[in-house]
Structures are given as C-alpha cells and as structure tokens.
C-alpha cells in the first residue's frame, strides 16, 4: 500500500464511516505490526508511526540489549549491539526501520484484514453509543426487509428489528414505506447492536403526543401517564401548568387537527384525553370517560383499591366493550377498580 493509497483509505474510513481518526491510526499501526510478524514469523517488538496528513507509514523493529539472549527476534547481546552503536548498554533499545514493501502482498493483506476488523468494532461501538441514548425514544426509518416474523427498519447507520406482533393491529406496511417506530431496547450482541422496535408499545403514543403538541416541550402541558390497548383505545392523562391553557383543547388542536394527526399514525385507534388530578378520586372518575356521574371512594390507599358507584345508564360506558374502558382506567390510575351500581350497593346493605 503506497502513501497515496493509504491516505485515500484513511480519509474514507474517517469521513465516510465516521470513525475517530485516532482509532483508525491505532488500528492500522497494530495491523502493520501484525503483518510484519506474520510475514517474518518473528516474535518481534514492532513500533509503527503513521502520518494521516500525508499517508507516510514508517515501521521499526525494536531490539533490547541484554546480557543473556532469550528471544533472538527481539533481543541483542551487548557485543552485537555495540557493533551497531558503540555506546550501547544493557537495557537500551535499538531500532531498525523496515520498509513496508518488504512485507509482500500477503502481509499487506493481513494488515488490511486487521484494519477492517477494527473498523467493524469501532462502527459497532459508535452505533451502540448513538442508539443507547435513543432507547425509549421515537425515530423515523424506512422498511428495508422482512421475513416471516419481523420487519427490518433502516435507521441510517443500522437497522432495527420490528416484530410483526409489535405492529398496530390491522395496519399494513409496504417495503420502502417511511415509518415512525419506538425504540424499546438496545442490546449489544456478538453480531453487533440489536435494536428492538415497536409501534404497539404505550411509549409510542407518548412520543407521538410530544412530537405533535409543542406545549409538552414548552412545559405548558404535562403528561402523567398513558394506558394503551393497541389498535383499540388509548387513555392519556394530561394537565396544564398554566390556568390560561386548556390541556384537552391544546391536544385536540384547531379543528381537531392535532389529535387527528395522531390518530392517523395510530391507524384509527381511539384516544381518550384524561384530565389529571392530584386527588385520586377525581382522577379515577375522569379516567373512566366517557362515563359520567360517577362516585369514587378510595377503599384502601395502601393496596390501591377504589370503589366506583354509577347508575345503570353509565355502567356499560364505564366498563366499556369487553371491559376495555375500566381496564385502561385501572392501568392509568394504578388503582384496582371495583364498579357497582347504586342498586347493587343497596341490595348488599339490605342483606
């Protein structure tokens, strides 16, 4: 590899692969040292010097002056050393420069392989560093591949895994589609970073709200929790830090555009906007929307149990189809909810 070839390769690795120049320099230095040892079959002490500015590569074989020879590849007896350098003493290190061309094609090929391995390691480390910070965040990617169980989403420097059972029920995707995904977990594996994605996770809804509604970033709105049955319904607990800002109205947006955009990404999933309240009884009553006229009593604060009393008209609304409404309200408030009508309460009292 001449100086021009080296400079071209070095610049490509640094600029195109985004790898630290010091990492590349160290990797290439180690590679040429390994190439020399393989080519000469010597257990030698090699020092390399690489100038990334002009591509100059210099390699020295280092010999330590000793009294008794144990490794002739890396040591010199004092008499031999003094023939090279008259004032040589025990413990001195004498260096002889070796021309890279002396290694031959095989040796240079070994060096290239070592460098490529170091580059792959550095790339994996870079990806891990970048995506580890993106765990629990949302990204936009492109559908690049699929197999029986997964879609593979191009996220730029790497691909994430989107299991088909983590899609929103009912949605269909096509190769090449731009798609928003939630990063559930980033793991380091022997084959490189593994990035697990989802569109079914409740965090996906949370990030959509933050993306669509700037008042969350401004601190005018707060999100206190999300409970989700993907493809069916989500409940989002919100509040306003400014009495002049309507939390629910801000999320709905002018002519309903904001909430419509979110629902569109969620493939038509219904959204209940729930006003958060520090009083758990009020919060629970709000969470059971669209049911109204509810009477809530905290039965056991430690065990997080509450009794909800409703009339016959609102009972089915509070429970919801297949029990979804009360299930999500329970998740959102973190209370076990026992719902009864006033007639049921009276019957129990009269028994």
Image (tube, rainbow, N blue to C red):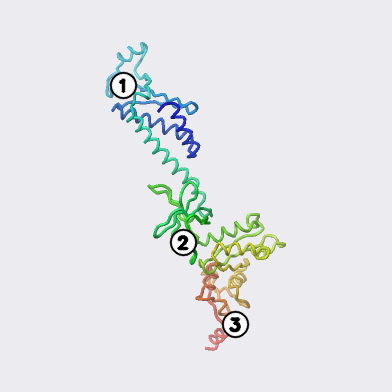
Q: Secondary structure at mark 1?
A: strand
x then y, percent, for residue 72: 28, 22
x then y, percent, for residue 42: 29, 26
Local packing at callout 2 (Cα closer than 10 Å; few below 14, some 14-19, many 20+) is: some
Give the CA separation, mark 1 to mark 2. Answer: 63 Å
Local packing at callout 3 (Cα closer than 10 Å; few below 14, some 14-19, many 20+) is: few
User: Of tags 3 and 1, which is closer to the observer?
Assistant: 3
Name the image quarter holding the N terminus: top left
Q: Which badge, 3 or 1, comes first in the chain's sequence?
A: 1
**Residue contact at pointers 2 and 3, CB within 8 angstroms:** no
Residue 166 circle label:
2
**Residue contact at pointers 1 and 2, CB within 8 angstroms:** no
User: Of tags 2 and 3, which is closer to the observer?
Assistant: 2
- Residue 325's image quarter? bottom right
In the foreground, 29 or 72: 29
Q: Is residue 11 above or below residue 94?
A: below
Label 1: which residue? 75
Residue 313 circle label:
3
Give the CA separation, mark 3 to mark 1. Answer: 96 Å
């Amino acid at each position: 590899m001449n100086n021009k070839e080296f400079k071209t390769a070095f610049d490509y690795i640094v600029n195109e692969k985004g790898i630290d120049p010091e990492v590349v320099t160290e990797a290439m230095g180690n590679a040429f040292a390994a190439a020399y040892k393989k080519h000469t079959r010597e257990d030698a002490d090699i020092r390399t010097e690489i100038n990334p500015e002009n591509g100059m590569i210099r390699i020295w074989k280092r010999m330590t002056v000793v009294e008794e020879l144990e490794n002739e590849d890396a040591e010199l007896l004092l008499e031999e050393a003094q023939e090279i350098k008259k004032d040589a003493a025990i413990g001195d290190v004498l260096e002889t420069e070796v021309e890279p061309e002396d290694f031959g094609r095989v040796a240079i090929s070994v060096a290239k392989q070592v460098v490529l391995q170091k580059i792959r390691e550095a790339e994996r480390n870079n990806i891990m560093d970048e995506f580890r910070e993106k765990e629990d965040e949302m990204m936009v990617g492109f559908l690049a591949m699929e197999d029986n169980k997964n879609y593979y989403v191009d996220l730029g420097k790497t691909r994430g895994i989107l299991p088909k059972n983590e899609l929103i029920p009912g949605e269909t995707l096509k190769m090449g589609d731009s798609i928003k995904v939630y990063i559930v977990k980033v793991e380091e594996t022997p084959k490189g970073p593994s990035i697990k994605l989802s569109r079914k996770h409740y965090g996906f809804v949370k990030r959509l709200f933050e993306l669509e509604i700037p008042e969350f970033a401004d601190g005018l709105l707060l999100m206190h929790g999300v409970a989700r049955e993907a493809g069916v319904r989500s409940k989002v607990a919100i509040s306003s830090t400014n009495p002049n800002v309507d939390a629910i109205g801000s999320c709905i947006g002018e002519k309903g555009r904001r909430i419509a955009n979110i629902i569109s990404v969620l493939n038509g999933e219904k959204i209940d906007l729930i006003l958060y309240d520090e009083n758990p009884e009020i919060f629970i009553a709000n969470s059971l929307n669209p049911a109204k006229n509810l009477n809530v009593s905290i039965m056991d604060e430690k065990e997080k149990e509450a009794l909800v009393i409703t009339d016959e008209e609102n009972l089915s609304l509070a429970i919801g189809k297949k029990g979804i409404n009360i299930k999500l309200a329970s998740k959102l408030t973190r209370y076990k909810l026992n719902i009864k009508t006033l007639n049921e309460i009276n019957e129990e009292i009269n028994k």
